[in-house]
Amino acid sequence: MKIDTLCVQAGYEPHNGDPRVTPIVQSTTYAYDSAETLGNLFDLKESGYFYTRLANPTVDAAAKRIAALEGGVGAMLTASGQAASMLSITNICRAGDHVIASSAIYGGTFNLFNKTLRELGIEFSFVEPTITADQLEQHYRDNTRAVFVETLTNPSLDVIDLELFAASAHAHHCPLIVDNTFATPINCRPFEWGADIVVHSTSKYMDGHAVALGGVIVDSGRFDWTSGDYPMLTTPDESYHGVIYTEQFGAAAYITKACTHLMRDMGPQQSPQNAFLLNLGLETLHLRMRRHCDNAMLVARFLEDHEKVAWVNYPGLESNRYYALAQKYMPSGTCGVISVGIKGGKEGAARFMEALQLAKIVIHVADARTCVLHPATTTHRQMDDRQLKEAGISPEMVRLSVGIEDPDDIIADLDQALMKV
Ligand SMILES: *Cc1c(COP(=O)(O)O)cnc(C)c1O
């Protein structure tokens, strides 16, 4: 089936007399007739529900839908995008391992890697998103176990050359993990370009209405974990009576380990209520993404010609340095987010934002309503000047998340606010 159909239909198939809409199974636990069945479930000898931290039918339906949209063999929902990024790494890396990450990544991901995971003993090298294959080569070490990038970065809108990073990672027998939050599978499916694992913050376009936090990890099922560098997948897990994930679960080894081992031990499960809301959001993802992109294109063109605007960064504009890469990886559109430099620096940016009426100042991004944010003083305020520069953030930069309202009204609001700068 085509992607628009998958958005609406994938993940849940009702049978005779079942609810047509994926029901919210608001139960932590599930009843069984025999202790033996429950024992088999614990040992992963049978599949079934027994405790919602490990699996829940509503959560599973949304995970299956996203796996179908990305073209993966399986997916695991998490309580937030942060939890998805954390587990995507800790599922295969331990203290002493090393990860190469793009420096142009979401601020929360940067903190997670540079502080928390570093403190847990995992080493990180951050590289420019525009790095060449030869330069990237210099960063691999014997203990490098993964490469992590963002398709379209929040908020600097760098477009990653997925094929370059995938080829480089694979030459070193490492998986490429891609945060695909901003592009969504409607505009880019990283597995088609060689990525091995995809993560999302579902709190953004997937939910689409700013109502439910969530994240997801999707497994392509294509990475070969048996090089010897991933013993957590290829040697017996004593906490599950000696299961060897690659032997018992084959292509789904990575995602099965994440769902059983990491979710069991760390527990950041998505709630059934949030998964229900996510499912509902996914049903219109294809329609909303098209409208977000159409509106953002009109807004970007309007801003590009405005006298109060210093620069516009939107990969859909022909003048953008990533235009060619965006055309290659996201031919039907990038996303609804634009970053724009307002004349008058930080003060100009503040005056513009405060004069807006329809567009509100919020930390969130990528939902139905147009909104703005000043990254340098909010989401990225913990970074020093050098780190800000590496992440592509300047004092006059405003992140504008174009919603799905009528574009004339959005442009009128931006225009009146710009005239007050
Ligand atoms: C928001 C975001 C995250 C973190 O997701 P939460 O759901 O807020 O935890 C990760 N990556 C990207 C690209 C994001 O935009």
Image: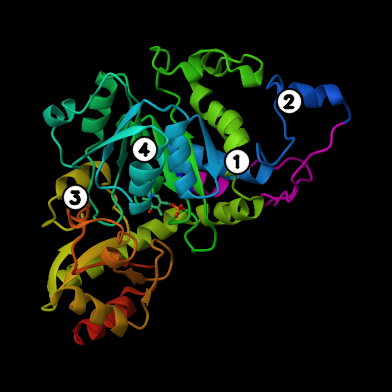
Q: Secondary structure at mark 4?
A: helix
Q: Which residues are magenta?
A: 5-32
Q: Position of residue 376 (x, y in %)?
A: 26, 64
- The kind of residue tagged 4 is Arg
Q: Nearer the viewer, residue 259 or 330?
A: 259
Q: Tell me the crowding category of disc 4: few under 14, some 14 to 19, or many 20 or more residues within 10 angstroms, Cα based.
A: some
Q: Nearer the viewer, mark 3 or mark 2?
A: 3
**Residue located beneath label 3 in the image:** 390
Does residue 29 appear anywhere in the picture? Answer: yes
Q: Earlier in the sequence, mark 2 or mark 4?
A: 2
Look at the picture and state if 339 lies above or below 389: below
Alpha-carbon span between mark 4 and mark 1: 21 Å
Q: Is residue 30 magenta?
A: yes
Mark 3 sits near ligand 1, with its Cβ under 8 Å away: no
Q: Tell me the crowding category of disc 2: few under 14, some 14 to 19, or many 20 or more residues within 10 angstroms, Cα based.
A: some
Q: Nearer the viewer, mark 4 or mark 1?
A: 4
**Residue located beneath label 2 in the image:** 41
